[in-house]
Image (spheres, coloured by chain):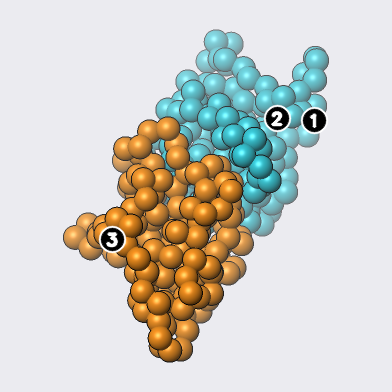
Chain colours: A cyan, B orange
Amino acid sequence: MLAAACAQTVPSRQSPGGVPGAESALPVSLIQLIANPEKFHGKYVFVTGYVRIGLENYSLCLVEQVLSTQECLWIQTDGTTPASEQEAKQQAEKAAVWKKYHGHVVAVRGTFDMHDTGHLGGWAGAIGKIAQLVVLR
Amino acid sequence: MGLDPGDLFASPDDAAIDAGNWARRQPLRYTVEFGGWIYPQNSCFTYNALSGSATSLPPQKFLSMRPPNAVAAWHTHVSSGDPSISNNFSGDPAIPGSGDRYSSLRLGVPLYLNTPAGDNRVYTGSAQDERVLPLFAKPKPCNC
């Protein structure tokens, strides 16, 4: 139930009064993104999925019981190669924020990247530049 | 001889050991992942290498640097804070097709892992084919 949901806005695109560009996010399902990556590549989308977090595992999955990470998107928190220990720690901390969403169903607004297929290339694409996250369950 | 990508080794195991040693000499050795491919060169084996982020290796770069004759892939784990996790192959029990072992199957080559504890493991395609290489083993150079 959305009214009871816990809304989180990721600071990168946060502004007082709402999520910038919220109206321009295409509402899509994970099935659409997985089946038609070319169509949605680079698009700002609104999508719902089941979060699994672990070592080398930042997944937004179609359902709770998927068979493989090909049925999930990689959650891209920051894919750059850090230049210093400090940057690396900041990057790890940014990723660690997602641990609290492990096992939850969330809706996110973010940009879909068909080329970013996650660790060792095992995911169906990635959702990054996440502007908003709402825990639905 | 040794401690650099491109050097020649007697076997894929030796190349993987050297790859792990090379990665652990890098400034961000425990905070970002390193990886690459192991492939034959003449009658020896060598490896290439790239660095990633705190959570993964960049997939496009990793996949695009795969030599056509790759015989294995290798990677390191960051020190995640929980040694029981970072010193083992990754994988989510709730997702059968996830983690290092599944990556090995998907990529079609054995996958080496250099752990923060310093050992090297290799998964070659089935639970019975998982090996731990001797700790602090010295990679054998190839005399070719």
CA separation in Å, label 2 and label 1: 9 Å
- In depth, the one of B39 and B61 nearer the eye is B39
- The type of residue carrying mark 3 is Leu
| Dots 2 and 1 on the same chain | yes
Q: Which residue is mark 3?
A: B133
Quarter where residue B9 is shown: bottom left
- The type of residue carrying mark 1 is Gly
For label 1, the crowd category at 10 Å Cα-Cα, with few meaning under 14, some 14 to 19 and many 20 or more, is: few
Q: Which residue is mark 1?
A: A21
Up/down of A73 relative to A47, above or below: below
Determine which of the numbered discs, if any, sits on residue B91 in the image. Answer: none
- The type of residue carrying mark 2 is Ala
Closer to the observer: label 2 or label 1?
Answer: 2
For label 3, the crowd category at 10 Å Cα-Cα, with few meaning under 14, some 14 to 19 and many 20 or more, is: some
Task: Identify the residue at horizontal 44%, vertical 47% (top origin).
Answer: B77
Up/down of A122 relative to A56, above or below: below
For label 2, the crowd category at 10 Å Cα-Cα, with few meaning under 14, some 14 to 19 and many 20 or more, is: many
Q: Is residue B143 left or right of residue A18?
A: left
Chain of the residue displaying label 1: A
Q: Which residue is mark 2?
A: A131
Up/down of A136 relative to B17, above or below: above
- In depth, the one of B4 and A46 nearer the eye is B4
CA separation in Å, label 3 and label 1: 52 Å
Q: Is residue A60 left or right of residue A115?
A: left
Q: Position of residue A62 (x, y in %)?
A: 47, 40
Up/down of B53 relative to B135, above or below: above
Can I make out residue B123 in this image?
A: no
Q: Secondary structure at mark 3?
A: strand
Q: Position of residue B103 (x, y in %)?
A: 41, 57
Task: Identify the residue at horizontal 46%, vertical 63% (top origin).
Answer: B19
Mark 2 vs 1: CB contact within 8 A? yes
Closer to the observer: label 3 or label 2?
Answer: 3
